[in-house]
Image (cartoon, rainbow, N blue to C red):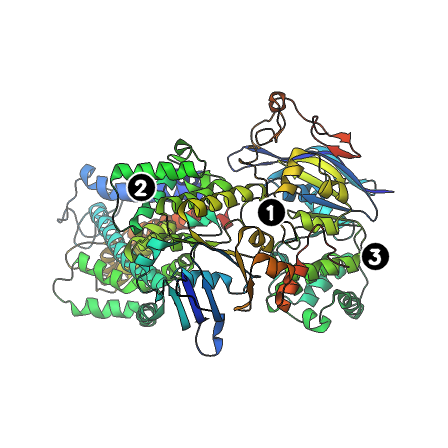
């Protein structure tokens, strides 16, 4: 059964000088219950803008241009931020942010922040029942539950803080979780602990469907079932993790994979590929392929022919010349 | 340029700057268009809206002439005190924050010492001890020399924060000396902040002068908005119901200070991206 | 262990910050040497002390205990030191003063040289340095730092190195703020520097994959100590320290199981 549907979603925002930036263009995908989709792209490709669009949270200067987002058949478009916050977030779609510090009120203890989330969504539940529930849930996170619950955010380590944020975001067993670079601010050892916790929550079926956004492809190889590669606001390739990592077809995906460096046997002689230049300015209309300027195999017509998603080798690729 | 454009987009800033420029123009152009005379021209306490639009004082002097002169004097004191306080405070703050260590500690100690001593009392004591030659410039100087610590403290914190930025490290490995680093690589980053502090210092300079003149320790060589109030008070204008003796100059002081606060508050919104809507 | 020809030699080199009870030992009893012409990477997680160690080699901090010798002598005159030892930093945007044009700031680099070349010579050297990092001089003329992309800004820092031609380059996370696709470019320019100028490069990074690719030797740092040093293959393929083993295990790699 389809749980999450996104159809031709385009988003734009307005700058202070009235310029229209088309940050996300023509994004379509569907997710079944239990699926994990990874979205990868480099800084400024529109990942974070997309996150807000996927939650239906349109706070100026961000506006939907076109398209539709549906959770379990319910549309998230044309709704006020208050409506989305009250009726959608936490229960249906929940977001895990990158910076745990900004997400937690520094003047309150973890247990109070968490208790508020439960109290706001469940009427007629007494304080004691809330705290019992909190303890049960926090026991799953592999931390000292009492210590963490009774601490202020600043008293925790970065890893404990991020795990608390994830715990609070998923308290109400949301149907969908969108994780926006949840481990990018952490070092590798802490990252592994946090990912382990997410896996544990998936196993316990606290939630089962997730979109995981990162700029790190090797991480997605271990986390995601399917991977979408984003460039200049568009999905350029969408396929299974195996397909994208080991058999990329879009020139940009190939470049990303080729640029990877790893400390594995036999990798020292591999020369990483490089692409000069930067993504196009999204304030100006673009007629051709957005990657054409930097593409090593671009043909003259690529610069003025719009590229659409097509299916080759069982996955979607936005390049008519990809084999 | 873009900064100025953004500033002019804020109605609060436009209101503040219009009011403030208005008072400056009044102080500078007013005497050219209006026949200023500080001699006796009419009877004691002539009521306003007659031969003299704002009436006359206890000596029969025209209040418009007095106010125009007083306005000029008050603005002069404000700018002098503001410039001195901002210059000393900025230099000490920027240097202490950048240097750190013992030098910073010493500057901090001096700053705190000045903050702890009630500066208004010092102001009164110093002004009181200059029986002769207590000029407008001297008053401005004294105000400036007693109010710099606030600037120093605020600038020091900012300077210490910028000190650890990468462009300072790069400037140092370029071989730039301390003075160049301070002036070229730290000061520009603080310029908007220093500007706002300066505006506040000017406002408080004008208020301090008014207050000290009000209690009779003002300049002996000129008329300021404060000395007008002092004379009104000394001659019992308040009890006699001679409202035109103190209302106009009070309004003038309020308008200038209000305009400066408007500029400061609106500029903060533009300079500080976090406060931007 | 200490070699007479070492360009850097540290013996129990330690750096502490703060005083009394709040004392923090950022670099703890490190002993190592770096030979001329080598590329050495210092690898470790956040807060391991790698950046402090790099700043000590650059002469921005002095050791509080032990010794750190450059060409067999401690660093006393930093201005002379910086003629030979230069750096590129992590965030290229925060490295340039936003109030001045990039070209004028490249010109400022000449300030460290003993003899300032003629005006014409300066302009020529800047142009050549820009071309060396594949930027046409007119592309940046009159431009301010915020008008360029991250990759271009990082190349500006490298252009500065081409201008100064130091003997040693300390590169503190030079690629962590640029996109993966552009990263290889930056590495190419660093290799070019090494080839052309026979430069010694000290790389500071958290990315062991990057260190493995570029270096002749790796130092693994943990809690202020160098816990392991050796060639890239020794360190990554047969690590001896438990910290190295853990660091390697924790990195997600595409060819290896990560979380079982």
Which badge, 1 or 3, is on the more N-terminal residue?
3
Q: Check chain identity for marks 2 and 1: say if they share one.
A: no
Instruction: Give coordinates of residue B50: x percent, y percent.
Output: 24, 42
Which residue appears farthest toward the front when viewing the image? C4
Q: Quadrant of residue C229?
A: bottom right
Select label 1 or label 3 by which is in front: 1
Which chain is indicated by disc 1? Answer: A
Q: CA distance from mark 2 to mark 1?
A: 74 Å
Please give left or right for residue B132 compared with residue C27 in the image. Answer: left
What's the residue at 29%, 52% (across, down)?
B249
Select label 3 or label 2 by which is in front: 3
B13, A192: nearer the viewer: A192
What's the residue at 67%, 38% (across, down)?
A253
Task: Decide if residue B46 is in sight here.
Answer: no
User: Considering only vertical position in the picture, is A257 above or below B208?
Assistant: above
A30, A41: nearer the viewer: A41
Q: Secondary structure at mark 1?
A: loop
Q: CA distance from mark 3 to mark 2?
A: 70 Å
Which chain is indicated by disc 3? Answer: A
Q: Secondary structure at mark 3?
A: loop
| Quadrant housing the C terminus of chain A | top right
Report the residue marked by disc 2: B22
Which residue appears farthest toward the bottom when viewing the image? C20
C35, B49: nearer the viewer: C35
Q: CA distance from mark 1 to mark 3?
A: 43 Å
Q: Secondary structure at mark 2?
A: helix
Report the residue marked by disc 3: A205
Circle 2 packing at 10 Å, graded few (<14), some (14-19), many (20+), is some
Select label 2 or label 1 by which is in front: 1
User: Considering only vertical position in the picture, is A24 above or below C239?
Assistant: above
Which chain is indicated by disc 2? Answer: B
């Amino acid at each position: 059964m389809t749980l999450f549907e996104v159809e031709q979603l385009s988003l734009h925002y307005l700058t202070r000088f009235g310029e229209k930036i088309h940050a996300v263009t023509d994004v379509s995908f569907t997710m079944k219950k239990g699926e994990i989709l990874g979205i990868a792209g480099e800084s400024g490709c529109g990942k974070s803008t997309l996150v807000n669009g996927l939650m239906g949270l349109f706070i100026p200067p961000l506006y939907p241009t076109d398209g539709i987002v549906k959770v379990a058949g319910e549309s998230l478009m044309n709704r006020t931020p208050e409506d989305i916050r009250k009726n959608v977030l936490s229960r249906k779609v929940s977001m895990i942010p990158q910076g745990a510090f900004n997400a937690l009120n520094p003047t309150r203890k973890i247990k109070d922040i968490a208790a508020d989330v439960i109290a706001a969504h469940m009427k007629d539940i007494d304080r004691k029942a809330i705290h019992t529930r909190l303890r049960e849930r926090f026991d799953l996170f592999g931390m000292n539950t009492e210590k963490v619950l009774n601490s202020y955010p600043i008293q925790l380590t970065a890893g404990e803080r991020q795990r608390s944020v994830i715990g609070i975001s998923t308290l109400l067993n949301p149907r969908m979780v969108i994780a926006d670079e949840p481990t990018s601010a952490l070092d590798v050892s802490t990252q592994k602990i946090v990912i382990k916790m997410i896996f544990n929550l998936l196993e316990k079926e606290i939630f089962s469907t997730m979109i995981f956004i990162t700029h790190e492809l090797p991480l997605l190889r271990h986390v995601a079932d399917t991977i979408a590669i984003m460039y200049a606001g568009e999905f350029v390739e969408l396929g299974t993790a195996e397909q994208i990592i080991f058999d990329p077809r879009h020139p940009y995906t190939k470049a990303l994979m080729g640029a990877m460096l790893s400390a594995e046997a036999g990798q020292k002689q591999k020369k990483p590929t490089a692409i000069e230049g930067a993504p196009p300015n999204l304030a100006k209309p673009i007629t051709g392929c957005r990657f054409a300027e930097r593409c090593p195999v671009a043909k003259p017509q690529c610069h003025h022919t719009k590229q659409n998603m097509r299916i080759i080798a069982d996955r979607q690729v936005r390049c008519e010349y990809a084999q | 340029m873009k900064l100025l454009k953004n500033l002019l987009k804020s109605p609060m800033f436009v209101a503040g700057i219009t009011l403030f420029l208005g008072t400056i123009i009044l102080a500078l152009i007013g005497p050219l268009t209006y026949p200023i005379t500080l001699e006796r021209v009419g009877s004691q306490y002539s009521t306003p809206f007659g031969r003299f639009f704002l009436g006359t004082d206890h000596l029969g002097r025209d209040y418009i002439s007095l106010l125009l002169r007083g306005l000029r004097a008050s603005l002069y004191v404000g700018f002098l005190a503001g410039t001195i306080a901002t210059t000393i405070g900025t230099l000490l703050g920027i240097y202490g924050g950048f240097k750190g260590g013992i030098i910073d500690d010493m500057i901090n100690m001096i700053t705190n010492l000045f903050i702890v001593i009630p500066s208004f009392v010092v102001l009164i004591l110093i002004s009181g001890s200059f029986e002769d030659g207590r000029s407008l410039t001297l008053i401005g100087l004294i105000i400036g020399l007693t109010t710099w610590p606030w600037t120093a403290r605020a600038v020091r914190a900012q300077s210490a924060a910028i000190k650890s930025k990468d462009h300072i490290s790069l400037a140092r490995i370029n071989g730039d000396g301390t003075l160049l680093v301070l002036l070229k690589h730290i000061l520009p980053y603080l310029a908007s902040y220093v500007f706002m502090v300066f505006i506040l210092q000017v406002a408080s300079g004008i208020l301090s002068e008014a207050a000290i003149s009000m209690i009779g320790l003002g300049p002996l060589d000129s008329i300021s908005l404060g000395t007008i109030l002092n004379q009104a008070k000394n001659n019992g204008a308040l009890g006699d119901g001679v409202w035109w003796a103190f209302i106009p100059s009070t309004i003038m002081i309020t308008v200038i200070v209000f305009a400066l606060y408007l500029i400061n508050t609106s500029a903060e919104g533009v300079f500080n991206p976090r406060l931007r809507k | 262990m200490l070699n007479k020809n070492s360009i850097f030699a540290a013996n129990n080199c330690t750096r502490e910050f703060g005083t009394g009870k709040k004392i923090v030992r950022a670099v703890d009893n490190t002993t190592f040497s770096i030979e001329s012409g080598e590329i050495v990477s210092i690898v470790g997680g956040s807060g391991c002390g790698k950046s402090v160690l790099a700043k000590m080699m650059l002469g921005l901090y002095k050791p509080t205990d032990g010794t750190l010798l450059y060409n067999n002598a401690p660093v006393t005159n930093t201005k002379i030191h910086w003629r030979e030892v230069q750096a590129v930093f992590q965030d290229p945007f925060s490295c340039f003063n936003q109030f001045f044009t990039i070209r004028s700031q490249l010109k400022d680099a000449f300030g460290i040289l003993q003899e300032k070349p003629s005006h014409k010579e300066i302009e020529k050297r800047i142009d050549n340095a820009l071309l060396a990092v594949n930027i046409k001089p007119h592309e940046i003329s009159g431009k301010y730092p915020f008008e360029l992309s991250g990759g271009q800004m990082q190349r500006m820092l490298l252009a500065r190195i081409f201008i100064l031609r130091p003997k040693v380059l300390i590169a503190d996370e030079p690629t962590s703020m640029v996109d993966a696709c552009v990263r290889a470019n930056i590495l190419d320019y660093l290799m070019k520097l090494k080839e052309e100028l026979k430069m010694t490069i000290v790389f500071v990074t958290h990315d062991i994959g990057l260190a493995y690719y570029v270096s002749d030797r790796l130092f693994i740092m943990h809690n202020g100590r160098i816990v392991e040093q050796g060639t890239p293959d020794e360190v990554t393929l047969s690590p001896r320290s438990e910290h190295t083993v853990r660091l390697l295990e924790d990195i997600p790699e595409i060819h290896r199981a990560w979380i079982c």
